[in-house]
Amino acid sequence: MTKIKQYKSPFEKFFSIILTFSLLFSTLISARADSAENNSELPMIEDVEENETYDVPDDCLTYLKVIGKKGDVDQNGELDSYDALLILRCSVGFKDIKKKFLKNADYDEDGQITSMDSLLTLVEYVNTQPPVIKFPDLTVACGDRFYFDAKIVPPSEGIGVTFEYETDDAESTDGSGEWVLDFTNTGKVKAHHPGKSVVTVTASNGLTAKCTVTVVDQITKQTIHVGDNTLNVTKHIMTKNDAYNETDDFERLDGIVIHSTATPGVMADRWYAAWNKPNTDAAVHAFLDDKGVYQYLPFEQIAWHAGKPCNRTYIDFEICEPSGFYYSKNIMTDYDVKAQQDYFDKIWKNATVYTAYLCTEYGLSSDDILSHAEVGRLGIGTNHGDPDHWFIKHNKTMDDFRKEVKRLMNSGNIYISSPTVVEK
Ligand SMILES: [Zn+2]
């Protein structure tokens, strides 16, 4: 069993007051509008007998029959927000009510029906309702991060400010032997592996509620917009890669590392099959080619791409290198620059657009972009030459890359569309 202390909420009491006043205000407005319309049809109070019926709006008529429990104006045996509404309507619509009718609605017993009586009735209602926990079921995707949405309704003073969660830590349905959910000590939850988990929440007054979290392994598509440029993103988390199951979330982010694969002709979509398994000694956030991006790890989480300490503070992506050449002793061999120029132009555009989006999304600047080669030269990670060794064949450098990202970041609106789920 996992137990985790949850947040204290200083907002509950405040929220209760705001709710009360906003309800009061809105009912006051509608009551004024109604009373102006109906006043001429209403009998004067001194002409009304307690048990007679009159052809007037139902709520006002009911009010005129008031007997019994204070505040329960409609005599249905419950003090509720509808009573507060009735009192408010009457306080606006009737100016000369006789005392025998005031008994239940005059909450503060000052001899008048006013909006204060309505407010007091409403507050009493809120304070006397047995609170319940609202804890809705959830469906989330592997790799998603979320907070449970458990609320005491209605918000009640002294109740429901502390939550404690328990989960059955259900095992996944993908045979990985991993949990469906992972909890952090801040209350954030990672939807870890596919399956269902029942989570119980307990409030400070002993109330409990359950919700079922369904975690699904799904593929989604989104479109990134950077100025006039668009870029397709397919997201499919590699739940069997060891990095996904073993690494922590980032504590801080220093920048983005740009790689290229040094694997000619293996495009972005093919890395899922290659790396979504245990004992793969590498993991990157995304692969990019001339068609778009495949994201394989959550950007909240540390990947294995450039060694320590770089990995702990840098997100990354790999640019796929085209077919038509090979590596000999780490040197690109038989690389036809002219024949490859079209592919290169496409990945250059896609990579700068993607980086401009990521910088905006994670509050980074173009100065926070490094190539893997630069990481090595700075001594903060492994010593590789990518992707500079490829860029230079097309007369491009990382400074050109940063300059273009900076231009794109200033070029207009940057956003990503809502995800749509793709059938596998
Ligand atoms: Zn690299």
Image (spheres, rainbow, N blue to C red):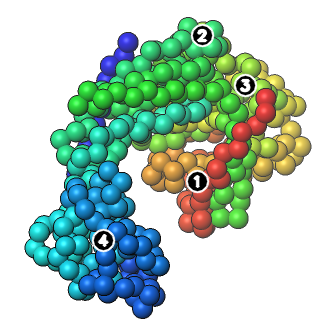
The earlier-in-sequence mark between 3 and 2 is 2
Q: Which mark is residue 356?
A: 1
- Residue 359 vs residue 64: left or right? right
Q: Residue at x 18, y 67 (%)?
A: 103
Coordinates of residue 310 in the picture (x, y in percent): 44, 30
Q: Residue at x 30, y 84 (%)?
A: 47
Question: Rounded to the nearest whole Å, what is the CA distance between mark 1 and mark 2?
Answer: 36 Å
Which amino acid, by three-letter code, is at mark 1? Ala
User: Comparing marks 4 and 2, which lies closer to the viewer?
Assistant: 4
Question: Rounded to the nearest whole Å, what is the CA distance between mark 1 and mark 4?
Answer: 74 Å
User: Comparing marks 1 and 2, which lies closer to the viewer?
Assistant: 2
The earlier-in-sequence mark between 3 and 4 is 4
- Element class at badge 2: loop
User: Comparing marks 1 and 4, which lies closer to the viewer?
Assistant: 4
Mark 1 nearby-residue class (10 Å; few <14, some 14–19, many ≥20): many
The earlier-in-sequence mark between 1 and 2 is 2
Q: Which mark is residue 50?
A: 4
The earlier-in-sequence mark between 1 and 4 is 4
When asked about the image quadrant of residue 17, the answer is bottom left
When asked about the image quadrant of residue 140, the answer is top right
Disc 1 and disc 3 in contact, CB within 8 angstroms: no
Q: Is residue 133 above or below residue 172?
A: below
Quadrant occupied by the N terminus: top left
- Residue 420 vs residue 75: left or right? right
Coordinates of residue 293 in the picture (x, y in percent): 70, 40
Name the residue tied to disc 3.
271
Which amino acid, by three-letter code, is at mark 2? Ser
